[in-house]
Amino acid sequence: MIIVPTALCQPGMRIGKAVMSEHGRVMLGHRVELTQFMIKKLVQMGLDFLYIEDRETEDIPIEDSIHEDTRALLRMALSKIYTKFSATSTLGGMTNAAEISRLLFEGISRVLDDMNKGRKDLVSITTLNMAPATTLEQHFCQNAINVCVYATKLGMLQGYSHKELIELGLGALLHDVGNIQIPSKLLLSSSKLSASEYIEIQRHTELGFNMLKQDIGIPLLSAICALQHHERIDGSGYPNHLKGAEIHEYARWIGMLDSYDAMTHPRAYRNSIAPHYALEILYANAGSLYDIKKVTQFRNKVAIFPVGQGVKLSTGEIGVVCRQNSFIPSRPVVRVLKNERGEKLKTHYEIDLSLALHVMIDNCSERAIYSRDK
């Protein structure tokens, strides 16, 4: 299986992994054969990439850290929260807090079950086959689930108890819930914010804490994650300029993971950056903004280049990540499909980046893999 830019797909190609809507519903099922109309429609929707069955990569499995039905359940819970607390919603009073709480706890329990089945595996998130976030609600859901998956897996590897994992998972899932009550024009602004506008956005931490503490039946420590996830260990964060151990450990995890997820996904005011550059930024700020032990754990246990990811190497060669190295996930095994001149190889070969230390991943490059051959 390979990740192909939707605009470069051809009629007759078969879907390697179901295409999901922003609400987690299946739009195109596994092995559906693409038509020109389907391709055009997906491009119009803004879905940039598809998982495609491919002879040269048919032996490469692409698996998410959580099941699709688990992701759908989390989205349902988050959507109900958005409906209840949105500043523009007229249905908030009709949304049952007890039902939301039940869905949240059931969702986190399923995340733990999914993670336990692959307890020794690296954590990897594969959401390229999902329609991109085009509204604040969609962005809220995607970011929440990503951070939740990262945090829960890392918490398990830290040896947290079941109770602690529930607290951490809920805190990660709901860390940005306060943004629901911030004016959308500020969150979607592509221009530099004024000092007063920035202060208004910072209010989302306290708003989120109060919403969770008062209206949703979740543990207090989970609500504290919403309050503290923008605190930084040198005291430069907000809202209370806490330092070091004054910030709860859960919030230190979530603050780092939220920063990484934000950097690797586009915002209204900037483009996304490649995963390895985002990791470099985390390390550059370890000891000042982030806990260096947590950054190191993230580097050692998160597959920032998931299997199926197209990459361009420092040698100019182009290929796809085919296997992970559990002891150094930032240097996976790459199956080379094109040479440094962009010519498709008759016979592919693999480079283990944990052994070929002189070779680096230059950037993510699905388009180069499936561009017209020279």
Image (spheres, grey):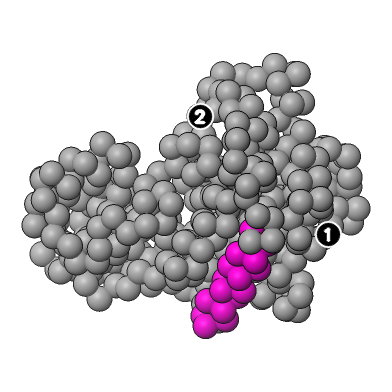
Q: Looking at the image, is mark 1 or mark 2 nearer the viewer?
A: 1
Q: Residue at x 72, y 78 (%)?
A: 162
Among numbered discs 1 and 2, the one appearing first in the sequence = 1
Q: Residue at x 76, y 75 (%)?
A: 163
Along the horizontal axis of the image, is 357 left or right of 250?
left
Instruction: Where is residue 273? Give x, y as percent.
Output: 49, 41
Q: Foreground residue, 140 or 191? A: 140
Q: Which dot marks residue 278?
A: none
Q: Secondary structure at mark 2?
A: loop
Magenta stretch?
100-118
Quadrant hosting residue 241:
top right
- From the image, tell me which residue sits under label 1: 220
Q: Residue at x 63, y 61 (%)?
A: 99
Within the magenta stretch, is there residue 64? no
Q: Residue at x 52, y 83 (%)?
A: 117
Instruction: Where is residue 153? Give x, y as percent.
Output: 61, 70
Q: Foreground residue, 13 or 335? A: 13
For residue 7, say whether it is visible: no
Magenta: main secondary structure equals helix
